[in-house]
Image (cartoon, rainbow, N blue to C red):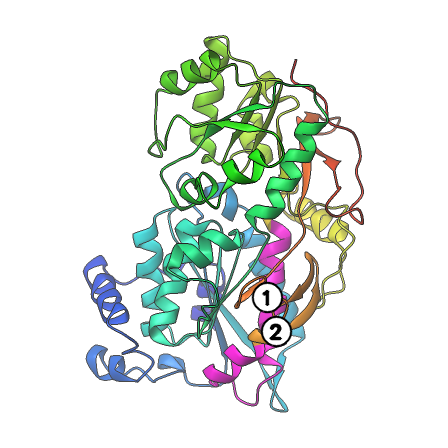
Amino acid sequence: MAETQRRLSGITGGVPLDRRRFLRVLGSAGGLAAAGGLASACGGLQESGGSGGADVIRIGYVSPETGPLAPFGEADQFVITAIGEYFAQNPIQVGGTSYPVEIIKRDSQSDSNRAADVAADLIGNAGIHLMLVSSTPDTSNPVSDQCEANGMPCVSTVTPWQPWYFGRGATEGTRFNWTFNFFWGLEDVEAVFADMWDQVPTNKTAGALWPNDPDGLAWGNPQTGFPPAQAQRGYSIVDPGNYPNGTQDFSAQIAQFQAENAEILLGVPIPPDFTTFWRQAAQQGYQPRIATVAKALLFPSSVEALGDLGVNLGTEVWWSPTHPFTSSLTGQNAGALADAYTASTGRQWTQPIGFAHALFEVAAAAFSSVEAIDDREGLAQAISQLRLDTVVGPLDWTAGPVPNVAKTPVVGGQWRTGTDTPYDLVIVSNTQNPNIPTAGTVEPLR
């Protein structure tokens, strides 16, 4: 019981780094763990149940709790604790038998190599039956790749489907055997941002901040990313080129945006990098009329770090307390789930709450569709056919847009000075999803 609680709270440590890397090599070699070879290689582990037997459903969960992507994982411990308490009272029924659930949390530390390492350890050492992973391609892609190589069912989220799908080497029609994703796509956020831009008079020139990471490469792709999509809408993109994460001087980008009079700012930087950019932009006299910045501006903490410079900055909104959806597990609607987070933590709601919760909705539905908890093929098949109404909206893996992907809605918001909090995220664009209510209209930065 003590070990179960220790894992549930996410404190369990990993194996030494050299061993994790050893496991990672085994995993990339093509499914050794799934075939049971890892058991003999690493000391008698069972094929599916690990060292703890097959009497407990073990779910691995990987996300960034520390490092520059830490805001994405801020709500994970709340969700895992709440879901753990729910499963303690409501065990999952598999093949007519009730099973307790153990959630084994690992921190990717915002590092792709670390994400792959801890995924290999969960598969090879922890005896998990299903992997869940969240938050940006930097985490979701390496974890998904480990699961695909090792025959481990895996569900990822908070990663746009193009970087997850094409970024892992897929082509049109490719079907992964073990890995699945639910989130929106670039086509959706392109439409949301364009609708926000259309509401502010500009010269239709957007300066782009594209980091040299999977998101930045996908969003800035000249054939399949933002440039061709927004060109069709009459907008042009000023692209200074991809910059490395952790850049400390954005003077070159700012100078180019000023020289080409980019009245719109667009990008998908990590939170610390946008804070650096936006402060330097203010110091150097660059102020666009509207800014729609993905990733960096999703979280209250990121905007609060900007002080007064955060007013009316825009971003995509994929979940909020006013989203009209309800959990298939707990029956909580989005507002109740957000309120529970604030009551438990004392912090303002944040978008990943709903998607972390929805991962466990998918997990429970998948296990309920098979006859044995170690039926990996059955779990993968169940997810591939799953249709489920969740707290982030309806999921349908039979609908596409490509195999292994289910889409979720996205709208647009701006940060406004709050009453009880420093900033509130106000939904201002719902053209793509009118069932999600707005609470204001787009306001220019100047």
- Extent of the magenta region: 353-382
Q: Is residue 348 visible?
A: no
Give the answer, above or below, for where 329 lies relative to 272. below
Label 2 Cα neighbours within 10 Å, binned few <14 / some 14-19 / many ≥20: some
Between 155 and 420, the one nearer to me in the picture: 155
- What residue is at 43 percent from the left and 51 percent from the top? 137
Q: Secondary structure at mark 1?
A: helix
Between 67 and 204, the one nearer to me in the picture: 204
Q: Amino acid at mark 2?
A: Ala
- What's the CA distance linking mark 2 and mark 1? 6 Å
Residue 332: image location, x then y, percent: 75, 59
Q: Which residue is mark 1?
A: 360
Give the answer, above or below, for where 378 lies relative to 174. below
Which quadrant of the view contains residue 116? bottom left
Q: How many marks?
A: 2
Q: Is residue 246 left or right of residue 200?
A: left
Q: Is residue 90 left or right of residue 78?
A: right
Q: Which residue is mark 2?
A: 364
Residue 118: image location, x then y, percent: 34, 61
Magenta segment's dominant SS is helix
- What residue is at 75 percent from the left and 26 percent from the top? 419
- What residue is at 52 percent from the left and 39 percent from the top? 228
Residue 370: image location, x then y, percent: 57, 86
In contact (CB < 8 Å): disc 2 and disc 1: yes
Residue 10: image location, x then y, percent: 45, 58
For residue 2, the mark is none
Q: Locate the C terminus and report the quarter of the image it occupies.
A: top right
Label 1 Cα neighbours within 10 Å, binned few <14 / some 14-19 / many ≥20: many
Q: Secondary structure at mark 2?
A: helix
Q: Amino acid at mark 1?
A: Phe
